[in-house]
Amino acid sequence: MDGAYDLCVEPQFWERAQNPGYTCLMYSFGVGYDFSFDDEMARLGCEVHSFDPSMHYEDGMVRKSGVIFHKIGISTVDIEKDSNGWKMRTLKTLLKELGHSGKYLDYLKVDTDAPEGGFEDAIMQELLDTGLHQCVRQYAMEIHIAGPLNMPKKLERMRKIHKQMTDLNSHGWRLYNTTDNVRSMLKHNPNANQLMNKKTIVKDQRMIFWETAFVNLEVKGPCSV
């Protein structure tokens, strides 16, 4: 299911394990009307902010769980209204506007869809460029690989994502779990897996989805923006 993500509760990566009164902070980009994981994180004691400009909910809506919804999307630049009519912000700007400078980002989740894939490459690049990777304790994202990979632009995006993950690894981030997301394929084949698309994605307009989970071994301090 698309609302399932990993949470590492080892004390090194989950402050509430050693300090039950601690209020963790979570940003969730890409909801798609499925708040199940966000709601659960709120019940675990986190201040959760969910972002999705495509949903028909009022900006600032607070769910019963305490999750705060923002009708805002993640972007490489700050825009009041893009071509879709959506308000877009960088991660750095959101941390500043929401008053979270000086806090750790205990959990960052990115699962955003776009015609060319997703926005996970944009947010990873911002984390690296701004140094915000140093204040994120855990990170979950769905990687969207869009074919055909014989198109230079799409192949370059895949290589870029690989490099970004490698760079984050050099800064102490560790990939500890991956999940083969085959929800769209299961409708036609209950035994489907992503490797079935391995050959066809080179020439065809197919998608491969992977849920990934990271922990940060080298957290330096709170976010500063």
Image (tube, rainbow, N blue to C red):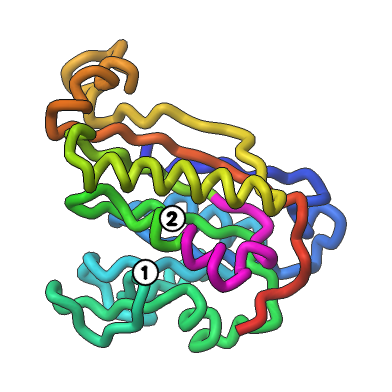
How packed is label 1: few (under 14 Cα within 10 Å), some, or many (20 or more)?
many
What amino acid is found at the position of numbered circle 2 in the picture?
A: Val
Q: Where residue 34 sits: x, y (%)?
A: 35, 52
20 or 211, which lies in front? 211
Evaluate if marks 2 and 1 touch, with contact meaning CB atoms under 8 Å apart: yes
User: Residue at 29% across / 30% down in the picture?
Assistant: 183
Label 2's element? Answer: strand
Q: Main secondary structure of the magenta part?
A: helix
Q: Which residue is mark 2?
A: 110
Q: Is residue 22 visible?
A: yes
Label 1's element? Answer: strand
Asked if 47 appears above or below 174 in the picture, the reply is: below
Quarter of the image with the N terminus in it: top left
The answer to whether 88 appears left or right of 173 in the picture is left
User: Residue at 69% across / 76% down in the picture?
Assistant: 103
What amino acid is found at the position of numbered circle 1 in the picture?
A: Ile
Quarter of the image with the C terminus in it: bottom right
78 or 33, which lies in front? 78
Q: Tell me where the magenta segment starts and ends, as one range.
A: 124-139
Q: Which residue is mark 1?
A: 74
